[in-house]
Image (cartoon, rainbow, N blue to C red):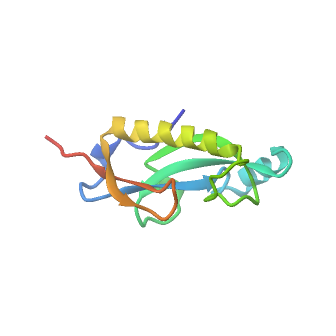
């Protein structure tokens, strides 16, 4: 399940592009980060994908859309998609959910990519 932090593409400047970023749940709050650490099992933590304007500072207010969380081992190479990284299937599902929500809001995928496999870039769809 995704959460929209805005009214979609209509509330964003027409030249703005957004990019998918991966963040640890609680990244913006030390209390939430502590709870995430204490409740994780065997060194795992909850992560999520967020969409924010490309080049914007990592600030919760900049989030355009927030994806559902999924568990990741804290010291894992997140760019490594080879087995036995059990989190990878769930992460791909969460990314697909966020993608569908962004498209529903009026964004379209750009051929431009960021530096990670999840770093999809979106542009505002043409407005009538």
Q: In the image, residue 71 lies at what x, y percent?
A: 71, 44
- Closer to the camera, 101 or 92? 92
Specify whether 9 is left or right of 118. Answer: left
72 with respect to 100 (left or right): right
Observer able to see residue 5: yes
Q: Picture coordinates of residue 2 (x, y %)?
A: 51, 36
93, 124: nearer the viewer: 93
Residue 74 in picture, x, y percent from top left: 75, 56
Q: Where is residue 95 in the image (x, y as percent from the top left)?
A: 51, 43
Up-down: is 19 above or below 128? below
Residue shown at 24% from the left, 54% from the top: 14
Q: Is residue 7 visible?
A: no
Q: Quadrant of the C terminus?
A: top left
Rendered view: 124 above or below 104:
below
Residue found at x 68% / y 44% = 87
- Judged from this view, the residue extending furthest toward the front is 83
Instruction: Tell me if residue 90 comes above or below residue 42 in the rendering.
Output: above
**Residue displayed at 30% across by 58% down:** 16
């Amino acid at each position: 399940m995704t959460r929209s932090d805005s009214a979609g593409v209509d509330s964003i400047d027409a030249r703005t592009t957004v990019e998918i970023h991966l963040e640890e749940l609680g990244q913006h709050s030390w209390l939430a980060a502590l709870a995430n650490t204490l409740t994780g099992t065997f060194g795992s933590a909850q992560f999520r994908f967020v969409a924010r304007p490309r080049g914007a500072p990592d600030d919760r207010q900049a989030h355009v859309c927030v994806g559902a969380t999924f568990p990741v081992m804290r010291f894992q190479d997140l760019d490594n998609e080879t087995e036995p990284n059990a989190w990878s299937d769930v992460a791909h599902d969460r990314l697909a959910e966020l993608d569908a929500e962004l498209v529903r809001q009026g964004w379209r995928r750009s051929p431009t990519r960021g530096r990670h496999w999840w770093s999809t870039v979106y542009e505002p769809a043409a407005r009538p």
